[in-house]
Amino acid sequence: MKAGAWVWILLGVVLVTATAGGAAYFMSRRKYLEKHEGRRATVYIDTAGHPTIGVGHKLLPGEKFPRPLTSAEIDALFDRDMARIERTLMPAIRAPLNENQKTALLSWAFNVGAEAAAQSTLVKLLNAGNIRAAADELLKWNKETRDGVKVVNAGLARRREDERKLFLS
């Protein structure tokens, strides 16, 4: 194949990715969150005791999933959850973000709750332009409540380290 052909192939990949818009955007975030949340077609109880399905979707009151979800249904459920998280979190952030920062923050908010994330010290530090301090704030969100007491969860601590690393890249 001639060298010029590779340029056209690469250009085609870029154009397809750019025109895919939301689908490519959600796919990369989904893959990142699947690394931490897992992907399950049936309801299970997560480490905090919540009934969960798909990619970390906590069942809402009255929500039932009597049969295993298809891969497409899991993806659609994730896309709805992520869109809701983004609608809540992103208006609170005035600082410019690169895609890695945005993915890290959306992963964190997906896990801790978008409302809590939007009102956090992390967002205040980020909006003040203190990127490093904002990244360090991620590490503080490593606890879960057990019997009414907040305790460090090793899995959450690893996840926050990973999100911080992504945020700073």
Image (cartoon, rainbow, N blue to C red):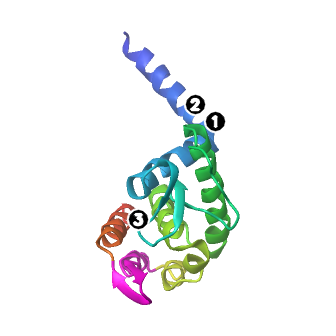
| Amino acid type assigned to the residue bearing label 1 in the image | Thr
Choose the circle earlier in sequence order: 3 or 2. Answer: 2
Q: Nearer the viewer, residue 56 or 10?
A: 56
Question: Circles 1 and 2: CB distance less than 8 Å?
Answer: yes
| Residue furthest to the top | 1
Residue at 37% from the left image edge and 61% from the top image edge = 166
Residue range corresponding to the magenta coloring: 130-152
Q: Is residue 120 magenta?
A: no
Location of mark 3 (residue) = 167
Q: Vertically, is 50 above or below 145?
A: above
Q: Circle 2: is it few (<14), some (14-19), or many (20+) Cα within 10 Å?
A: few
Report the Cα–Cα distance between label 3 and label 1: 26 Å
- Numbered circle sitting on residue 19: 1
Rendered-image quadrant of the N terminus: top left
Question: 107 or 16: nearer the eye?
Answer: 107
Q: Quadrant of the C terminus?
A: bottom left
* Residue closest to the eye, 129 or 112: 112
According to the picture, the residue beneath numbered tag 2 turns out to be 16
Query: Where is residue 133 shown, x and y percent of the image?
Result: 39, 81
Q: Residue at x 53, y 64 (%)?
A: 51
Question: Secondary structure beneath disc 1?
Answer: helix
Label 1 crowd (10 A; few <14 / some 14-19 / many >=20)? few
Q: Quadrant of residue 119?
A: bottom right
Q: Residues within 10 Å of mark 3 (few under 14, many from 20)?
A: many
What amino acid is labelled 3 in the image? Answer: Phe
Tell me the SS state at disc 2.
Answer: helix
Farthest residue, direction right:
62
Q: Position of residue 32 (x, y in %)?
A: 43, 52
